[in-house]
Image (cartoon, rainbow, N blue to C red):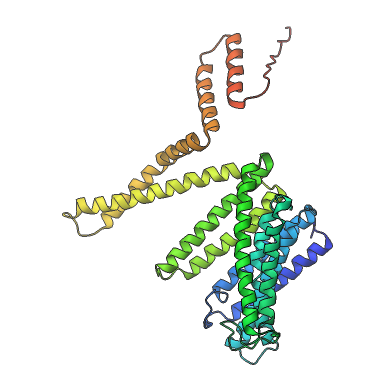
Amino acid sequence: MKGLSRPAAIVLAIAVAAALVAAVFDVLGLGTDTPSDDFGLTGFGGFVFIGASLAFTVPGVLIVSRVPGNRIGGVLILIGLLLGVGILAYEYADYAIYISPGTLAGVDGAASLQNVALTPCIALLGLALLLFPDGKLPSPRWRWAARVCVLGSVLLAVGYALRSGPLDPPFDQVVNPTGAGSFELMDALSGVGWLLSAAGVVLAAIAMVIRLRRSRGEERQQFKWLALVGVALGTVFLVNFLTFILGIGGLNHARDAILGIALASFPAAIGMAILRYRLYDIDVVINRTVVYLALTITLAALYVGTVLLAQLILSGLTASSNLAIAASTLAVAAAFRPARARIQELVDRRFYRRKYDAARTLEGFAARLRDEVDLRALDAELRGVVADTMQPAHVSLWLRTPSPQ
């Protein structure tokens, strides 16, 4: 593994091995419904969490190897390993209890381990956001917020590890083998852990907003990457929630896939920002995202409106809607290029005014250049265009002296 230190390579190998074994057990359980699997950690949903474990581990390993002073790498590795171990334990227990009972040993331990490993990840994600992008807190005053995240993760792990009695569904037929405290006390402890974890994530989001407003230059570009992915992730969660509440069926696999991609993109964005991979391309990504999102909404509205209008006009001629659909498709295809150009112009004018003004200035200069023959006038014109578009501190123009014949 070129470019990785030996410990980092070992960590990555462990994460990959855990993911592969978990995937094997998940494949063996496909087609078998696990009762009370409310979080969708088996079947297709299991692959989502397996991928998420690697999505956290790989950027963490790269950060630790190439930016060893940044503590975010260690936090991402810890999240990835906890996800990997937790999902492996979950798939193992699911296979041993529901698919092939009595064939594997250590079932109770695996069922308990998945709770202990998976639950602290949310608070640790809040800690990673607090440390973004340089591995340091925004200021010493934010130490208490980091302590909230750490304490929340610890309380969750301890509460679930020591809670006596049966585990939560779908493994509620298993009695916790490590239960040493009363159910009520440990359940209250884990409840406090959940509250602290949620509070830690909220505090991390507030800290990020404050740091974003104060950031400049390269640090601001790093925050843009994470902000873009954060908006996308929030949108995915909202759409996922609405489709679930509205009872739109047949979308479970699609929801799992989109949610998995969104979750995986979060640590990937952190890694790209810290490693500065294509860092300054974010403005292009944001520009294209805004343009194509607006274009999609516009064309979808045009399509629906044209279909309804065509059906109304043609209702007396034909009972079939195929003609209306064909006409709408042609209208959308014809409107694609001009609509994209118009939306791009509006986005540049509204959000990228300097780029828009520079492009207009260069277009005007190119038009005037065709008819300009006076060298001094051309010199003055060129200096003015460079000053308007590039805004340099100083402009100099050197002209090559013709060699004597």
For image coordinates 26% across by 58% down, the residue present is 321
Q: Is residue 55 above or below residue 345?
A: below
Image quadrant in which the N terminus is located: bottom right
For image coordinates 62% across by 26% down, the residue present is 390
* Residue 299 in picture, x, y percent from top left: 38, 48
**The quadrant where residue 92 appears:** bottom right
Left or right of 213 in this view: 322: left
Q: Is residue 101 visible?
A: yes
The total of numbered circles placed on residues is 0
Left or right of 31 in this view: 15: right
Q: Residue furthest right?
A: 6
Q: Is residue 76 above or below residue 396?
A: below
* Residue 57 in picture, x, y percent from top left: 70, 63
For image coordinates 43% across by 70% down, the residue present is 250
Left or right of 307 in this view: 192: right
Viewer-closest of 250 and 210:
210
Q: Is residue 345 above or below residue 367?
A: below
Left or right of 337 in this view: 204: right
Image quadrant in which the C terminus is located: top right
* Residue 2 in picture, x, y percent from top left: 80, 57
For image coordinates 69% across by 85% down, the residue present is 179
